[in-house]
Image (cartoon, grey):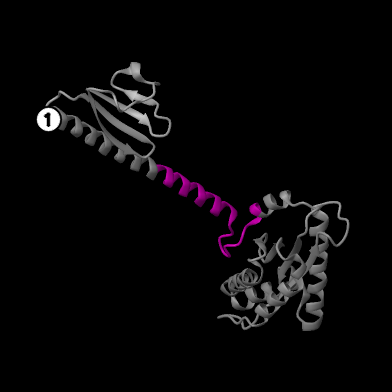
């Protein structure tokens, strides 16, 4: 009696009680022999015995195959669980290392990585955003109110922008959005954001204000990605200055 482990696709013998058979092609139709086979995933386990063997010997052979398959199944389940655990741990690490803890947006690390991969020859839009009055909210209402505003701003961004690109929190109240889908509709997308911000009311604050600057990669011949982000930053601060001039609030708070 011989036991073989065979590749189910190639029919090559991968293991055998007689090592000289390893590497040969398995044939399960030899005259005078009986084969008991069980397929398990990509492998076939076969027991070869003379047809003249008695029934008791056949039962023993089948029992051996059953024990082998049971052991193999347990080992495969164990290996699979380890692979899935390693995959989960890797994905968890990648998520936590690239995600802002408070807002669940992408963080500065993810931003720096993605900025290196941007191509000025493709169409995309860069939005630089900054909350207005965060320092005032922190000073007068407490940091819980400030955190509420930061999270509210990020949620409004997700509602308006998440379908078209990525949202990054790169500082305390500073965000960047990279729009890479439907760039031609950027005005409509920004309108959705403006309405969402306008309609927001929270537990500590009744309203929220966000200044932003938008730059399209195609609007001029930029020499670097940094030039795009710098122009968006300048436009954001112009918008912020206009906000404080209109609202009459203390402009010293807009950098906080």
Q: Residue at x 29, y 18 (%)?
A: 18
The image position of residue 72, as x and y in percent, is 30, 36
- In the picture, the quarter occupied by the N terminus is top left
Please name the residue that numbered disc 1 is placed on. Answer: 55
Q: What secondary structure is found at the residue carrying circle 1? A: helix
In the image: residue 192, left or right of residue 7 = right
Picture layout, residue 178 above or below residue 36: below
Residue range highlighted in magenta: 82-110
The image position of residue 26, as x and y in percent, is 35, 25
**Quarter holding residue 101:** bottom right
Q: Residue at x 64, y 66 (%)?
A: 163
The image position of residue 160, as x and y in percent, is 65, 72
In the image: residue 99, left or right of residue 254 = left
Q: Nearer the viewer, residue 54 or 22?
A: 54
- In the picture, the quarter occupied by the C terminus is bottom right
In the image: residue 5, left or right of residue 108 = left
**Quarter holding residue 86:** top left
Q: Residue at x 64, y 76 (%)?
A: 137
Q: Nearer the viewer, residue 123 or 92?
A: 123
- The question of residue 89 being in magenta is answered with yes
The image position of residue 123, as x and y in percent, is 78, 59
**Quarter holding residue 140:** bottom right
In the image: residue 197, left or right of residue 27 = right
Picture layout, residue 113 above or below residue 131: above
Residue ranking furthest to the top: 20
Crowd tier of the residue under label 1, counting other residues whose Cα lies within 10 Å: few below 14, some 14–19, many 20 or above:
few
């Amino acid at each position: 009696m011989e036991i073989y482990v065979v590749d189910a696709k190639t029919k090559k013998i991968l293991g055998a009680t007689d090592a000289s058979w390893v590497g040969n092609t398995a044939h399960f139709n030899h005259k005078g022999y009986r084969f008991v086979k069980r397929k398990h995933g990509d492998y076939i386990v076969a027991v070869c015995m003379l047809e003249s063997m008695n029934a008791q010997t056949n039962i023993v052979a089948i029992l051996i195959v059953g024990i082998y398959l049971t052991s193999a199944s347990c080992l495969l389940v164990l290996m699979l669980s380890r692979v899935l655990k390693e995959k989960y741990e890797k994905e968890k690490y990648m998520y936590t290392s690239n995600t802002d803890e408070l807002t669940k947006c992408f963080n500065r690390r993810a931003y720096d990585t993605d900025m290196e991969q941007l191509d000025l020859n493709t169409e995309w839009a860069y939005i630089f955003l900054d909350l207005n009055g965060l320092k005032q909210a922190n000073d007068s209402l407490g940091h819980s109110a400030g955190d509420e505003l930061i999270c509210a701003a990020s949620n409004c961004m997700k509602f308006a922008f998440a379908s078209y690109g990525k949202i990054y929190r790169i500082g305390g109240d500073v965000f960047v959005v990279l729009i890479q889908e439907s760039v031609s509709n950027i005005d409509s997308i920004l309108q959705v954001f403006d309405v969402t911000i306008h309609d927001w009311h929270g537990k500590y604050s009744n309203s929220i204000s966000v200044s932003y600057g938008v730059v399209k990669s195609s609007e001029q011949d930029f020499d670097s990605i940094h030039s795009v982000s710098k122009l968006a930053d300048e436009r954001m601060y112009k918008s912020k200055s206009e906000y404080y001039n209109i609202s009459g609030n203390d402009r010293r708070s807009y950098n906080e």
